[in-house]
Image (cartoon, rainbow, N blue to C red):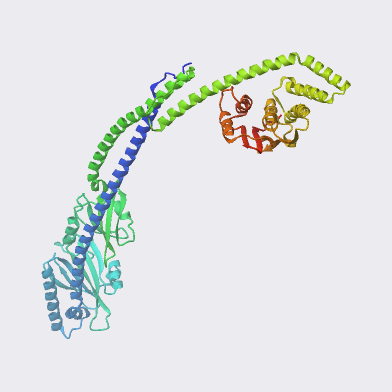
Amino acid sequence: MKFIKSGPFWNSVGFKVFILYFVSMSFTVAIMGYLSFTKSTSVIQSNVGAIALQTVEQAEKRLRIILEEYENRSQIILGYQELQRGLIGKFSDHYDRVLNTKTVAAFVTNLVNSKNDTVSMHLIGFSDTSYRYSLMTSSGVLVVPPADSAMLRKDWFRSIIDANGKVVWFGVRHSLLPIDSPLYENNPVFTFGRALKDLQGRGEIIGLLLYEIDPSLIQEILSEIDFRASGISFIMNRSGDIIAQDPNIYLPAEISKLKLPSKPQGTLNANIQGEDKLIVYREMEGTGWLLVGMVPTKNLVKDTQEIKIYTLFLAVAFVIVAVILALAVGRFVYTPVYTLMSYMKKAREGDFEAKIYHGRKDEFGTLYESFNVMLSRIKQLIDELYVQQLLKKETQLKMLASQINAHFIYNTLDSIHWISRIYKIDAISTMIFGLSKYLRLSLSDGREFVTVSEAVELVESYLSIQKARYEDKFTVDIAVDPDIRHNIVLKYLFQPLVENAIYHGIENLKGKGELHIAWRKTGTGILFTVKDNGIGIPGDRLESIRNTLELTDMRENFALRNINAQIKLIYGNQYGLTLESELGKGTCVSMIIPLVDK
């Protein structure tokens, strides 16, 4: 099986990086384009709405001036004393009545002629006389009967009375008091009314004014409101009733259901007859009416179409750039990955001498260096393992040979032991017994690992031989942590360290030596120490030994280096030997190995 499989192009890292980069860039461009277009559309709508609101405000001011003029005109009528006397009927005789009628007629005629917009004027009295002027008749000002009971019950009549002298605006509508004449055309008129009070008396209501004016001026103002977007304008009250509108414009019935906010002015969006509309409104002061402008939203944002097209072309350009950049990035990532895969294939085939030569300073450079170090380390571990296997086989051969002759050696040593006892040579007897026991424990049925208790017994057997040899040259103190007696350790690690302490530390000591041996539990490991009060090691020699412990060359310091190598190979690089020594005071060798259960 090949390490690098040939497969579809879309399975490669380069293609996946290309897709990831392309999709992320395209998505980003799409989101930015959409947000940009949405924001520009919102800004344009907001600006157009503000302009439309300003237009409505200007139109409202013009309409307010007209209404103020109508109100002032009515105030002149209310304050005319001859009119009040005629409505009450305060005449001394018939001649006085006739004179009063002529005076009132002249006043009304002059007033309507000065403005030239009056359609009709009704001055309705309650007790004696009423007056009527109509542009549609040739009779001018007529004296008519006062209000009858039927008129008093009319809603419009009651609303004027209830206003108590304030102007009541009825808006553009058909006449509330149509004239029975063949010349009369009941066209829409702008109507308002006002109660007439007795200014000479106690201010009681003596009649009312119903004024009907040509609405063309108001309609002209409504038609002149220019939103530059096919909009329409009209006046309505908050109940949805249309007060005035451009007669040439059709208003949908849905407008009567339109509920505008209670604020005096503002804008809102609404759907009228399935079309989105921008509605601007402003309350007309003193009337309770609203001047409303309504514009199709699509007409307001015509300019955004150009922005939309520009944004689309810009997005396409960015996508093309994204494709080019994605290809470049994909190639940039794929090339070093492919190089690494090629060298990994060589390593898989056994070429551990392969090395990636490069000049990169980025993450791939770090990856290449790590790969080179990994191959070098693998080769080193293989070499070390090979050496260890040779050592292990040599040891196994020696153990096999010793096991073959073990029975003969035990019997021979036992015979020598008993002969020494017969002839009472206790020193030889002790050494032979210790040697026999040491050999038996060393072989231990061919096992490489023994318990701590067995390792302690092996060291004690060796020490019994050495004490017989050196007699009272040194004393021994052995301490064993009872918690670790049943843990498993490598058999050959401890005796060589004790032997080194005797031969290199105590043997050349003048005076009596001391040897302290201990097995202690520390954290998750076992700490074994051999401490002597021997001659110690010079500083330069100590440093040399420490440095050579890590070497794989077995020609020098074989015992210590072999033990250290065995520990690291079996237990790991974090374990091993440490040496502390002071010339003339002694040496301490420490060994850390992990706790291994039986």
Is residue 24 toward the left or the right of residue 294 in the image? right
Name the outermost residue toward the bottom. Answer: 92
Residue drawn at x 71%, y 15% as measured from the top left: 400
Whether residue 273 is visible: no
Can residue 331 be seen in this snapshot?
yes
Residue visible at 23% across and 83% down in the picture: 200
Residue appearing at x 88%, y 21% in the figure: 423
Relative to residue 84, is residue 555 drawn left or right?
Answer: right
Residue occupying the far right of the picture: 422
Quarter residue 431 falls in: top right
Q: Position of residue 393 (x, y in %)?
A: 64, 17
- Up the image or down, 195 lies above or below 560; here it is below
Q: Nearer the viewer, residue 185 or 181?
A: 185
Q: Residue furthest front?
A: 510
Query: Within the image, what quadrant is residue 106 found in?
Result: bottom left
User: In front here: 581 or 509?
Assistant: 509
Horizontal and vertical percent for residue 30? 32, 38
- Nearer the observer, 564 or 145: 564
Specify the quadrant that holds the C terminus. Answer: top right
Name which quarter of the figure residue 6 lies in: top left
Q: Is residue 23 left or right of residue 451?
A: left
Q: How many marks?
A: 0
Is 262 above or below relative to 69?
above
Query: Residue 297: x percent and y percent?
Result: 27, 48
